[in-house]
């Protein structure tokens, strides 16, 4: 025992000498900030001198206390047993067993009814994560209720058997508190890992991994609770305070070794918690997955060394600051995964669902996790630094003139603005098609079909503009808020912006005209995205609408950008319905009534077509002869359909009418030129001036007729042409 004690004290002295060097360098670096302290050191040697002096004083006190250990032991046994000896301890164990049995019995009796209620409440399906969480919460609540009944019943037994001043009552109640804490930790760990139910597991893990982590964490926490309970009992029963300078660091060392064993035993399970099979791991992550147990072991030993030194020297306030730093480091992997699981549930919020929400949510989660990790690391470093007796945060804040505080405010404002923008983005994207929401429309969609179809809804047209406006408004508000945090007066900026706006309005009247005209066109619902319109002498499908112009995609592929100020009228060919009028030429001798009946019959058959029949609003019908030309009767037929389908129906209508007329002996009339020749001459083969002139006139007339027909055909061949 003596040699173990000497080895333990030698190890502490070595740690303290190393920490003395670190602390001395720390003091020397920040000596300028410590002028108002009671003690000021001029050099690192002086610092080490005072530290070693304090170590020697504490060691002398500890050795003096150890020399009185027989008396202390006798007093401690007296206080613990009240002179009842070994038999009293046996009786205490029996009473504690009675407490446990009584508590468990009453808990089971009451739990029978509680379990039936819990079963009725949890009979619903637990297929979704939310339903599983509700089930876990209900079960956890009933388990904590049962634990409360157990503690109350067991505590009542101890209170009944032992008096108020009996030390056995204190010991039994502390032991009951230890059991209660261990069971409460088991309930919480079961809520997180669910070792016996994979469907209710909060963190997605394999069953064997979940069981290993569950029991390892429960064993470690139970060990910690047993040690801290023993500390409290020894302090209550008059153990000399200087003895804690040896016991507390020693028990802390045991806990630290246990934590290192825990880390190395579960290193593969913890690594799998942070890796995803569907994602490609970078080289940095692969290296980190190999070295993190070593780095974490070293880090925990460093924190324990500083904590043990402060405990031995009696700097209990500094030691208390290191306790949360150690626990944050040790429990961070589990806490990080819990936060990750909770953040991933943002994807399940129905009113935020949109086409790109899941992708943006993944980016948001990664950024939040990185921010939380940085915050945890900063807190741990701050706690370690404060354990040396210095407040580096206040020093930096003082030396930098409040820049750190302003930086924190700016970061908070940026995070809030980012969250608000994500909510706005998701709300708008829910009402937009995927290609509009993700800005992936490159004009290829207009290649489908012949154009002129029904466009997007009014909300799909206006919401992209609203999104752009909200982004500009949010960025402007963010910039003004950041400037206000930095101490810039924004009132003069707003006033100046108004003056600049007036100047720009006078200097850029055309731009203002474009913007205002566009606003009224959109308010009038003159056109929508995807509609085929004619504006400013140009035609095309509306592809994009900005704040000052509209972009049209011609059916031949040309992109046409028209400022709103250039548009006087808009001719929309895609709104509600469209009527197509078709003309064809027949001979003078054609039976008009027969043609009408044939066209009507064709129109009725087209209504039954499986593809375009449902798009008719009014069937194909004849309008009779609309005019008479030199060589033919001009017939017209028409139909009414939904926009965008008129081109397919027109092609089929021409084909079906042609076939119907041909099957009934009716042919289309062709353009022709009739030339009257002079007859009665004896020599018919001899050319005459009159004949030459006549042939020349006939040729000119034929050429003119062919040119006119060619122009007419070219005009009718335009896909966007419509006759009145």
Image (tube, grey):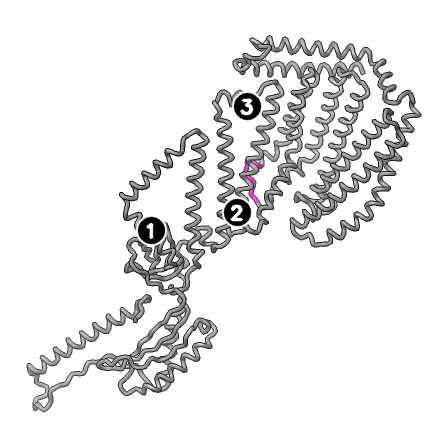
Q: Residue at x 42, y 73 (%)?
A: 617
Instruction: Check the image and report above or below for 517 versus 252.
Output: below
Reading the image, the residue beneath label 3 is 393
Q: Secondary structure at mark 1?
A: helix
Quarter of the image with the N terminus is top right
Q: Quadrant of the C terminus?
A: bottom left
515 or 77, which lies in front?
515
From the top left corner, tell me how far across and down residue 24 is, in percent. Answer: 59, 13
Q: Which residue shows up at 69% across the image and 45% down it?
A: 201
How far separated are the C-alphas under marks 2 and 3?
37 Å
Which residue is painted at 88% across and 19% down in the image? Answer: 78
Distance from disc 2 to disc 1, alpha carbons, whole Å, reads 36 Å
Q: Is residue 647 visible?
A: no
- Extent of the magenta region: 279-285
* Mark closer to the observer (1, 3): 1
Compared with 533, 210 (above or below) is above
| Separation (CA) of disc 1 from disc 3 | 53 Å
Q: Which residue is mark 2?
A: 359
Q: In the image, residue 484 lies at what x, y percent?
A: 44, 32
Tell which circle, 1 or 3, labels the residue nearer the N-terminal end.
3
Tell me the residue that label 1 is attached to.
516
Per the image, label 3 sits on a secondary structure element best described as helix
């Amino acid at each position: 025992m003596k040699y173990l004690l000497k080895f333990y004290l030698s190890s502490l002295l070595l740690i303290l000498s190393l920490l003395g060097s670190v602390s001395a360098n720390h003091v020397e670096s920040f000596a300028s900030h410590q002028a108002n302290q009671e003690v000021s050191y001029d050099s690192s040697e002086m610092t080490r001198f005072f530290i070693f002096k304090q170590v020697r004083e504490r060691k002398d006190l500890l050795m003096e206390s150890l020399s009185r250990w027989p008396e202390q032991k006798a007093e401690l046994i007296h206080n613990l047993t009240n002179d009842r000896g070994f038999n009293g301890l046996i009786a205490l164990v029996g009473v504690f067993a009675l407490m446990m049995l009584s508590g468990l019995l009453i808990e089971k009796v009451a739990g029978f009814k509680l379990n039936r209620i819990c079963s009725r409440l949890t009979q619903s399906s637990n297929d979704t994560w939310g339903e599983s969480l509700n089930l876990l919460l209900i079960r956890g609540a009933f388990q904590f209720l049962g634990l409360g009944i157990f503690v109350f019943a067991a505590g009542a037994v101890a209170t009944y058997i032992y008096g108020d001043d009996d030390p056995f009552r204190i010991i039994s109640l502390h032991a009951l508190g230890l059991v209660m804490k261990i069971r409460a930790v088991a309930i919480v760990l079961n809520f997180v890992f669910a070792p016996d139910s994979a469907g209710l597991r909060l963190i997605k893990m394999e069953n064997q991994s979940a069981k290993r982590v569950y029991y390892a964490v429960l064993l470690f926490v139970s060990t910690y609770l047993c040690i801290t309970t023993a500390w409290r009992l020894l302090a209550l029963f008059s153990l000399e305070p200087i003895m804690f300078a040896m016991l507390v660091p020693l028990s802390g060392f045991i806990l630290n070794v246990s934590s290192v064993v825990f880390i190395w035993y579960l290193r593969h399970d913890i690594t799998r918690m942070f890796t995803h099979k569907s994602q490609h791991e970078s080289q940095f992550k692969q290296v980190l997955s190999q070295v993190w147990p070593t780095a974490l072991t070293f880090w925990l030993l460093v924190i324990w060394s500083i904590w043990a030194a402060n405990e031995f020297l009696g700097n209990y306030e500094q030691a208390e600051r290191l306790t949360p730093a150690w626990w944050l480091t040790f429990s961070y992997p589990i806490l990080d995964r819990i936060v990750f699981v909770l953040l991933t549930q943002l994807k399940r919020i129905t009113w935020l669902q949109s086409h790109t929400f899941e992708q943006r949510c993944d980016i948001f989660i990664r950024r939040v996790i990185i921010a939380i990790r940085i915050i945890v690391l900063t807190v741990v470093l701050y706690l370690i630094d404060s354990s040396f007796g210095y407040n580096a945060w206040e020093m930096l804040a003082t030396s930098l003139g409040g820049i750190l505080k302003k930086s924190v405010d700016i970061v908070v404002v940026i995070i809030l603005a980012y969250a608000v923008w994500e909510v706005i983005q998701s709300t708008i994207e829910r009402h937009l098609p995927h290609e509009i929401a993700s800005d992936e429309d490159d004009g290829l969609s207009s290649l489908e079909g012949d154009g002129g179809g029904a466009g997007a809804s009014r909300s799909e047209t206006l919401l992209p503009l609203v999104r752009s406006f909200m982004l500009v408004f949010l960025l402007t508000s963010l910039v003004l808020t950041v400037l206000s945090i930095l101490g810039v007066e924004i009132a003069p900026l707003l006033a100046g912006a108004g003056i600049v706006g007036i100047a720009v309005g006078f200097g850029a009247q055309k731009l203002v005209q474009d913007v205002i005209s566009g606003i009224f066109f959109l308010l009038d619902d003159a056109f929508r995205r995807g509609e085929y319109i004619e504006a400013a002498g140009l035609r095309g499908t509306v592809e994009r609408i900005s704040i000052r112009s509209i972009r049209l995609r011609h059916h031949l592929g040309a992109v046409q950008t028209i400022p709103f100020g250039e548009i006087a009228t808009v001719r929309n060919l895609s709104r509600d319905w469209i009527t197509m009028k078709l003309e064809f030429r027949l001979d003078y001798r054609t039976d008009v009534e027969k043609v009408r009946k044939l066209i009507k019959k064709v129109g009725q058959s087209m209504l039954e077509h499986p593809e375009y029949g449902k798009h008719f609003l009014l069937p194909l019908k004849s309008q009779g002869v609309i005019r008479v030309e030199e060589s033919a009767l001009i017939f017209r037929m028409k139909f009414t359909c939904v926009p965008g389908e008129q081109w397919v129906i027109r092609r089929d209508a021409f084909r079906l009418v042609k076939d119907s007329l041909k099957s009934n002996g009716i042919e289309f009339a062709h353009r022709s030129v009739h030339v009257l020749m002079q007859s009665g001459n004896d020599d018919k083969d001899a050319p005459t001036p009159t004949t030459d002139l006549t042939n020349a006139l006939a040729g000119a007339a034929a050429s003119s007729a062919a040119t006119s027909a060619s122009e007419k055909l070219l005009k009718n061949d335009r896909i966007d042409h419509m006759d009145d």
